[in-house]
Image (cartoon, grey):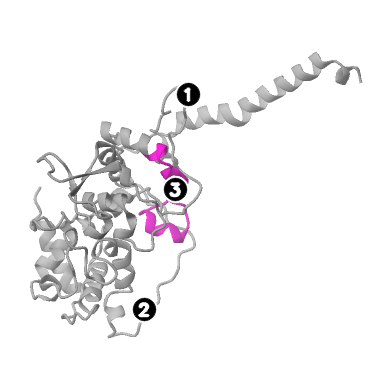
């Protein structure tokens, strides 16, 4: 009992046990991980603008709703090409001496995971419109509008980044929406979020709990597209810009409903736009290389084309994966080095 009545011995022993457990449970394992987990060879360092954007990502509470970890389960396939590895976070250092808000893995998905959002949604135009008011491009979104990161100018300068926002979202104000430096920093950080490819020869980790894809009887459209779901692919990769009704967003993203490209006979142009993007329309923003970024197969490209050609009143010619593959091989062969 003397031990429990002597506060020096009691608190001294408790302190030693606390320090010892901290060393064994936290500090030593952390040092071991730091020495044994290295960055992947192709990992890129954040640019100066992206570093500032990361600070804004934390300051504006984005970390509360978005994770940056692709779990090893089938349902996370939409967030990245592979499950996250320890190496993905090995190069992330403390924000500064006092703060360790560096690894933004998150704990909640009120919004989508952002591990690979730089590949999934690389369009700068879309990201700026979405940041100004998410409901413009995703009507069901619960994300708050970050309109304070933008200004409205009647006469933007040639160096200003103008955001194409429909007039009904300006609340009666006249002028053009211009992105501030903070908005551009934040977008730079989001666009930097890309899963690093594994070195050649390294086995790609497989997702657990894989679901079998049911195919329709031979001769059906789904069978020809080898199980690829055109509507699901459109929703995941195209709908945010071209919208659920296929009408796009005036001044920002072109319509697919009644589009001469979608309904036309120039399949090579159509496939090339999906795979390599498009930047030949002054009235619309630049379309990124969605197909290349997401490593679409000929089955997935043909499924998207067939969905777009048969939706919103469109009645275009059905295409096969074999037709698309010939064009994809030609496009890759003639792509600029």
Q: Quadrant of the N terminus?
A: top right
225 vs 146, nearest the viewer: 146
Q: Check if residue 72 falls in the magenta segment.
A: yes
Q: Is residue 288 above or below residue 159?
A: below
Position of residue 322 in the picture relative to residue 83 (left or right) = left
Q: Give the foreground label among 2 and 3.
A: 3
Q: Residue at x 31, y 72 (%)?
A: 231
Please state the horizontal and vertical placement of residue 146, each as a whole percent of the image: 34, 47
237 vs 178, nearest the viewer: 178
Q: Residue at x 9, y 41 (%)?
A: 158
Q: Mark 1 — residue?
A: 98
Choose top left, top right, bottom left or bottom right for residue 250: bottom left
Q: Is residue 226 above or below residue 152?
A: below
Q: Residue at x 15, y 66 (%)?
A: 271
Q: Is residue 155 above or below residue 3?
A: below
Instruction: Kindly report the distance in space between the C-alpha atoms of the residues bearing marks 3 and 1.
Output: 23 Å
Please state the horizontal and vertical placement of residue 253, each as a whole percent of the image: 19, 61
Magenta stretch: give its range: 57-84
Choose the circle earlier in sequence order: 2 or 3: 3
Choose the circle earlier in sequence order: 2 or 1: 1
Choose the circle earlier in sequence order: 3 or 1: 3
Q: What label does residue 215 carry, if any?
A: 2
Mark 2 nearby-residue class (10 Å; few <14, some 14–19, many ≥20):
some
64 vs 89, nearest the viewer: 64
Mark 1 nearby-residue class (10 Å; few <14, some 14–19, many ≥20):
few
Q: What label does residue 67 carry, if any?
A: 3
């Amino acid at each position: 009992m003397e031990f429990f009545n002597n506060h020096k011995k009691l608190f001294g022993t408790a302190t030693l046990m606390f320090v010892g457990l901290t060393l064994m449970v936290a500090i030593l394992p952390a040092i071991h991980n730091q020495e044994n987990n290295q960055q992947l060879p192709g990992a890129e360092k954040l640019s100066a603008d992206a570093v500032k954007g990361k600070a804004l990502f934390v300051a504006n509470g984005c970390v509360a709703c978005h994770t940056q970890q692709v779990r090893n389960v089938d349902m996370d396939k939409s967030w990245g090409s592979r499950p996250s590895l320890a190496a993905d976070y090995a190069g992330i250092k403390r924000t500064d001496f006092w703060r360790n808000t560096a690894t933004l893995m998150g704990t909640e998905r009120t919004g989508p995971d952002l591990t690979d959002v730089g590949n999934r949604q690389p369009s700068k135009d879309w990201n700026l419109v979405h940041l100004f008011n998410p409901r413009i491009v995703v009507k069901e979104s619960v994300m708050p509008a970050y309109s304070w990161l933008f200004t409205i100018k009647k006469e933007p300068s040639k160096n200003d980044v103008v955001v194409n926002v429909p007039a009904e979202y300006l609340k009666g104000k006249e002028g053009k929406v211009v992105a501030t430096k903070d908005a551009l920093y934040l977008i730079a950080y989001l666009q930097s979020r890309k899963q690093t490819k594994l070195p050649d020869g390294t086995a790609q980790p497989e997702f657990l709990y894989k679901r079998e894809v049911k195919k329709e009887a031979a001769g059906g459209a789904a069978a020809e597209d080898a199980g690829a779901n055109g509507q699901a692919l459109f929703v995941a990769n195209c709908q945010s810009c071209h919208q659920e009704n296929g009408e796009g967003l005036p001044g920002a993203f072109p319509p697919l409903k009644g589009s001469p490209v979608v309904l036309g006979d120039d399949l090579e142009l159509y496939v090339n736009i999906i795979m390599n993007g498009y930047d030949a329309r002054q009235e619309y923003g630049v379309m990124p290389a969605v197909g290349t970024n997401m490593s679409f197969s000929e089955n997935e490209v043909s499924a998207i084309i067939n969905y777009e050609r048969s939706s919103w009143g469109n009645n275009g010619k059905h295409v096969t994966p074999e037709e698309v593959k010939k064009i994809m091989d030609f496009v890759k062969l003639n792509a600029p080095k």
